[in-house]
Image: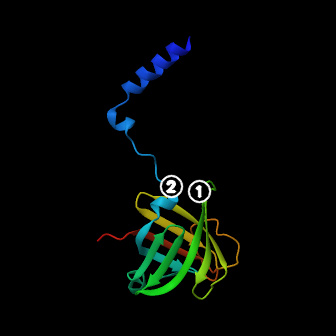
Amino acid sequence: MTRRHVAMLLAVLGAARPAEAQHAKPALSDSARMQGTWVMLSGATSGTPVPVEFVREMRRVAKGREVRVSWEKELYFWATVTLNPAANPKEVDYLLLDGPNAGEIQRGIYSISGDTLRFCFSRPGAARATDFTTVADDGRTFSIWVPLKH
């Protein structure tokens, strides 16, 4: 088969694709999907569920590589985010810039499916969580977030 034949075959195969496939947007990266304002659906710390009245007021705002988590408009923490989406489970590290653990690194895992974002973090300085669970006295935090709908 000559180059001309290959080029013609590729042109025909390309033309045979539906129009929407020819103009499909590339998939967004996990980082891009996490941008914006998120509301906590549920959470737990060291095996204890976060009270509903606390959950309702939690906000996660991601802009670029930074994230700010607040409660009732009061900053809970501010961090730079590093993702490793190739790991299994996917890994996330926060370099805490403000809050009670400023200067420390908090290691965790995450999953993002549709419009639901899940995190499980170990306490700052501890080994990374390996699953999305928390039990009494383990120092882990588990949270589920959805985008804020205006």
Identify which residue is drawn at 70% across, 72% down: 127
Q: What label does residue 29 carry, if any? A: 2
Quadrant in which the C terminus is drawn: bottom left
Q: Residues within 10 Å of mark 1 (few under 14, many from 20)?
A: some
Point out the frontmost of discs 2 and 1: 2
On the image, the x and y values in percent for residue 52 come to 40, 83
**Callout 1: helix, strand or loop?**
loop
Residue 22, compared with residue 118, is above or below; it is above
Residue farthest to the front, as pictured: 4
Q: Which residue is mark 1?
A: 85
Residue 3 in percent (x, y) is at 55, 15
> Relative to the observer, which residue lies in front, 76 or 134?
76
Question: Residue 122: horizontal and vertical position, in percent?
Answer: 63, 75
Occupied quadrant, residue 140:
bottom right
Question: Horizontal placement of 143 versus 17: left or right?
Answer: right
What residue lies at 45% left-to-right and 65% top-to-bottom? 35
Foreground of the two, 68 or 40: 68
Is residue 23 placed above or below 7 in the rendered structure? below
Q: Residue furthest left?
A: 150
Disc 1 marks a residue whose amino acid type is Pro
Position of the N terminus by quadrant: top right
Question: How many residues crowd mark 2 within 10 Å: few (<14), some (14–19), many (20+)?
Answer: few
> Under tag 2, what secondary structure?
loop
Q: Where is residue 32 drawn, in percent x and y?
A: 47, 59
Between discs 2 and 1, the one toward the N terminus: 2
Q: Amino acid at mark 2?
A: Ser
Q: Residue at x 46, y 18 (%)?
A: 9
Q: Say if mark 2 contacts mark 1, CB within 8 Å.
A: yes
